[in-house]
Amino acid sequence: MIRAHTIRLNPTPEQTNLFRQAAGTARFCYNWGLRAIKDALDQGVKVPVARALRDEFKRIRAVAYPWTFQVGKSAIEGAFVNLGHAVTNFFASRRGRRKGKRVGFPTFKSRRHGYGSFYVANDRLTVDGHTLTVSKVGTLNMTESLRFVGKILGATIRYQAGWWWISIQVEVDHTPPTHTGPAIGVDLGIKALAVTSEGEVFENQKYLKRALRTVKRLQRSVSRKVQGSANRRKAVRKLAKAHFRVACQRKDVLHKLTTALVRQASLVGIEDLNVAGMLKNHCLAQAISDVSFAELRRQLDYKAPAFGSRVVAIGRFFASSKTCNRCGHVNRDLTLAMRAWTCPVCGTVLDRDLNAARNIRDEAVRLAGA
Ligand SMILES: [Zn+2]
């Protein structure tokens, strides 16, 4: 099982320069390869694969780009691997062989979007407690020690929101335990983040709203500054940090929810929501993107195996809210505003979200057994 841990770094100013240089070289190689691919497409000749481009680059680099020798070689290898993935994903998506949203054709990486990132192969780094050693960069401090024990597969060092980060991939030896917990259904909502069939309520985080207000204020502040001025640059940096903060808070809330779910439940039933469709409804848009269902699903899927838990997604046309969990009567008149309703057949008073969560649980159990 492969796990990744992202840790903030405390590089010295000299090391920061080396990071920038490595990220810049990786960006250059990526763009160089992408240019070759675009040229091939324009000329209608066979598109070269990333590996061939890498070999070609290595052949000419001593003469054409001698400055690329100043950085570790894995930064260059990694750039071509990334390019290969980007191109493969694009063609797979266009041929309908890739799940999810359509992937666009790779675009050139721009320095305008930050310093970027670069890859470090596992033979180029060592980790010891809070100390990280990277070849050609030296020894530097990590703000946390690595959470996972196992073989380090590689790492990516990237710049984001004013800091340098390392994401270390580790091969973790793990035999999933047998989960003895119950099946739990989860109703994802707008009022609450989630309600489980056990009656547990996960609140939607209000402080996100406050953080979003700060983002809006900083956005206005940026737009008032003169283009290209130092003040504008400073304002942009502040805005990036605020955005990053919101993203971290969102992820944190989701991590707490998903960990709690896979810890408690041997089977997690969840609605397969059509998020893109829901986002079209403007009243709901803010709340939906707030709780970020796609990220929630991703976290559940990767955490469940570690606990021996299973995730079952229910089709989005399943009437989870409208069906009485006691007798199965379907209430066609239920509107979004009705938080509770009384079943006209069996007389049970039903809480909208809890009832939905129980229906989702039962449907998940049915699907899992089938
Ligand atoms: Zn009923």
Image (spheres, rainbow, N blue to C red):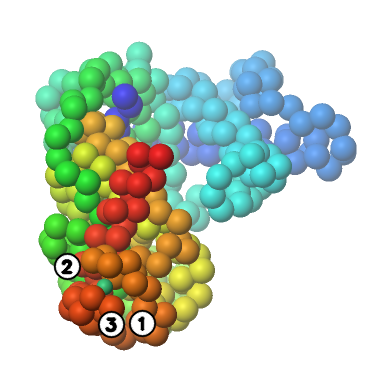
- In x, y percent, where is residue 19? 37, 35
> In the rendered structure, which amino acid carries the disc numbered 1?
Leu
Hey, which quadrant is residue 62 in on the image? top right
Depth-wise, is mark 2 or mark 1 nearer the camera? 1
> In the rendered structure, which amino acid carries the disc numbered 2?
Glu
Whether pointer 1 and pointer 3 mark residues with C-beta atoms closer than 8 Å, the reply is no
Above or below for 122 versus 349: above
Q: Which residue is mark 3?
A: 344
Q: Secondary structure at mark 2?
A: strand
Q: Which quarter of the image is occupied by the C terminus? A: top left
Q: Residue at x 27, y 47 (%)?
A: 268
- In x, y percent, where is residue 220? 37, 81
Return the residue nearer the eye: 85 or 313. Answer: 313
Is the CB–ligand 1 distance for label 3 below 8 Å? yes
Hey, which quadrant is residue 319 in on the image? bottom left
Q: Which residue is mark 1?
A: 334
Q: Which residue is mark 2?
A: 203
Q: Residue furthest front?
A: 345
Q: Which quarter of the image is occupied by the N terminus? A: top left
Depth-wise, is mark 1 or mark 3 nearer the camera? 3
Q: Secondary structure at mark 1?
A: loop
- Of callouts 3 and 2, the N-terminal one: 2
Near mark 2 (Cα within 10 A), the count class, few <14, some 14-19 or many ≥20, is: some
Q: Residue at x 35, y 39 (%)?
A: 369
Above or below for 174 versus 299: above
Q: CA distance from mark 1 to mark 3?
A: 12 Å
Q: Residue at x 23, y 21 (%)?
A: 174
Whether pointer 2 and pointer 1 mark residues with C-beta atoms closer than 8 Å, the reply is no
